[in-house]
């Protein structure tokens, strides 16, 4: 039985695809039970977040798990397969370790994914689909993630425009949790920014987008609400932080709009982050006393300051993971010889019992104990040595030398060669 990881994530599939294969928390355990009953999958766990849906399986046919993923969500395989990755053994272990350590997250180094992975393990255990292999994998995964986070600075430095947006806002507001955040646009950059700000649990999170349906999807991911673009002027005074990134050729937020908003806010400060090219917010807004306007250039300076340190942390984290992957694979390989070891010991135990029973009968007849012990040791030695000796004597010339080296290694013999 082999270990596989398969699924889709934010690297391989857009949100419109990811949401089609997501699992609701309340149905996770039923889904796991259905998977192991419907397909030749012995062990299974499912990790389902807003950025990924992944199946970790012990099976000989990973394609069966992929088929099930499409079938369960009533999708044709053609709709899932182009976005799906399947990782065997070593690659699967490394992937799981990287995911738990935050190296594969949309927000590099974010800690939330570790809790989500622990929940995936609990669901699999409750569903009865967490066998020896996956149990060991999860335990090792949690240990690796803890080691990465405690010995590297993987989550300590800012290396993305989205993270820099939060950092600059925190310069003005003591706590993002007390603020109301408005996102203008619903593209990839806004999606990244929303993930960062949502992690700070703001008081309110709103998306304004030209296509309201797309804005609604993004807002729902982060438990926010949605407004139309033409409502921004009216609603702007209600927000403390504004992050904008659209493809509009003309500014969306003008000087007059902001001046009116500040007046309604009684000049409470606003942080505005303009990530668009060309800009969404008129440059003159920066001259207003109560507005802190940051552009791509401002964010670039923050990112540059943390980039070198984060690079070093990622290198350290990858080195830790590579070492721990090798250790886990060694454990997996050791499991493969367990049946042979068990059979070898059982065979030796049968020989031992037979010789002891024979010796006890001789003692019961009054035989000399010393002679009985001698016979016992000789009989046991002969039986234990019979199989390797017979194999050496019966081997052909081509294989005898290799077999002799193997026997010498097994019994730690010094043959004088």
Image: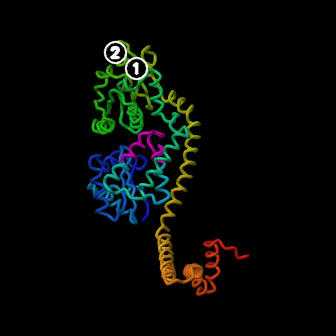
The image shows residue 221 at horizontal and vertical percentages of: 32, 39
Q: Which mark is residue 169?
A: none
Q: Dot 2 corresponds to which residue?
A: 265
Q: Are marks 1 and 2 in contact (CB under 8 Å)?
A: yes
The crowd level at tag 2 (other Cα within 10 Å; few <14, some 14-19, many 20+) is: some
Residue 316, compared with residue 135, is above or below; it is above
Q: Is residue 410 magenta?
A: no
Whether residue 23 is situated above or below residue 191 in the rendered picture: below
Q: Nearer the viewer, residue 150 or 73?
A: 150
Residue in the foreground of this view, choosing between 66 and 389? 389
Residue depicted at x 51% and y 64%: 334
Query: Which residue occupies 30% across, 39% down?
Result: 217
Q: Quadrant of residue 202?
A: top left
Q: Check if residue 103 falls in the magenta segment.
A: yes
- CA gap, disc 1 to disc 2? 9 Å
Which residue is found at the position 38% from the left and 50% from the top?
Answer: 121
The structure residue drawn at horizontal position 43% and vertical position 63%, both measured from the top left corner, is 2
> Relative to 78, is 345 above or below?
below
**Mark 1: secondary structure:** strand
Between 391 and 96, the residue placed more toward the observer is: 391
Question: In this figure, which residue is indicated by the disc labeled 1?
Answer: 270
Precedes in sequence: disc 1 or disc 2 = 2
- Compared across the picture, whether 7 is left or right of 412 comes to left
Q: Position of residue 278 (x, y in %)?
A: 44, 30
> Callout 1: few (<14), some (14-19), or many (20+) C-alpha neighbours within 10 Å?
many
- 299 to the left or right of 398: left
Q: Which quadrant holds the C terminus?
A: bottom right
Drawn side of residue 170 relative to residue 217, left or right: right
Picture coordinates of residue 50, whole percent (x, y) = 36, 43
SS at badge 2:
loop
Identify the magenta region.
98-119
Left or right: where does residue 234 sit relative to residue 3?
left
């Amino acid at each position: 039985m082999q270990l596989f990881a398969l699924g889709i994530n934010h690297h391989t599939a857009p949100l419109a695809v990811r949401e089609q294969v997501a699992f609701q928390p309340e149905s996770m355990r039923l889904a796991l039970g259905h998977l192991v009953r419907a397909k030749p999958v012995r062990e299974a766990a499912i990790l389902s977040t807003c950025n990924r849906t992944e199946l970790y399986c012990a099976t000989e046919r990973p394609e069966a798990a992929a088929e099930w993923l499409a079938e369960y969500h009533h999708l044709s395989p053609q709709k899932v397969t182009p976005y799906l990755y399947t990782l065997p053994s070593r690659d699967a272990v490394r992937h799981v370790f990287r995911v738990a350590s935050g190296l594969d997250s949309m927000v590099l180094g974010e800690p939330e994914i570790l809790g989500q992975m622990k929940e995936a393990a609990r669901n699999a255990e409750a569903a009865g689909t967490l066998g020896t292999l996956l149990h060991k994998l999860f335990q090792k995964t949690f240990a690796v993630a803890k080691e990465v986070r405690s010995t590297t600075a993987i989550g300590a430095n800012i290396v993305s425009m989205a993270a820099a947006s939060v950092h600059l806002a925190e310069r003005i507001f003591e706590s993002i949790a007390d603020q109301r955040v408005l996102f203008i646009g619903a593209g990839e950059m806004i999606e990244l920014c929303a993930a960062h700000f949502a992690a700070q649990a703001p008081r309110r999170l709103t998306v304004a987008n030209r296509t309201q349906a797309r804005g609604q999807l993004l807002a729902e991911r982060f438990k926010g609400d949605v407004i139309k673009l033409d409502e921004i002027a009216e609603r702007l005074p209600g927000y403390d932080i504004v992050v904008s990134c659209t493809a509009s050729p003309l500014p969306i937020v003008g000087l007059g709009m902001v001046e009116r908003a500040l007046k309604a806010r009684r000049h409470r400060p606003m942080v505005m982050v303009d990530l668009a090219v060309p800009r969404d917010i008129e440059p003159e807004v920066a001259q207003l006393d109560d507005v802190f306007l940051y552009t791509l250039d401002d964010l670039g300076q923050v990112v540059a300051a943390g980039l070198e340190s984060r690079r070093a942390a990622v290198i350290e984290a990858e080195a830790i993971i590579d070492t721990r992957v090798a250790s886990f694979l060694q454990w997996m390989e050791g499991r493969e010889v367990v049946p042979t070891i068990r059979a070898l010991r059982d065979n030796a135990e049968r020989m031992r019992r037979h010789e002891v029973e024979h010796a006890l009968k001789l003692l019961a007849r009054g035989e000399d104990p010393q002679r009985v012990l001698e016979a016992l040791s000789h009989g046991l030695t002969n039986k234990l040595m019979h199989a390797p000796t017979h194999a050496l004597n019966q081997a052909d010339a081509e294989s005898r030398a290799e077999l002799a080296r193997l026997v010498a290694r097994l019994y730690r013999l010094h043959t004088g060669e």
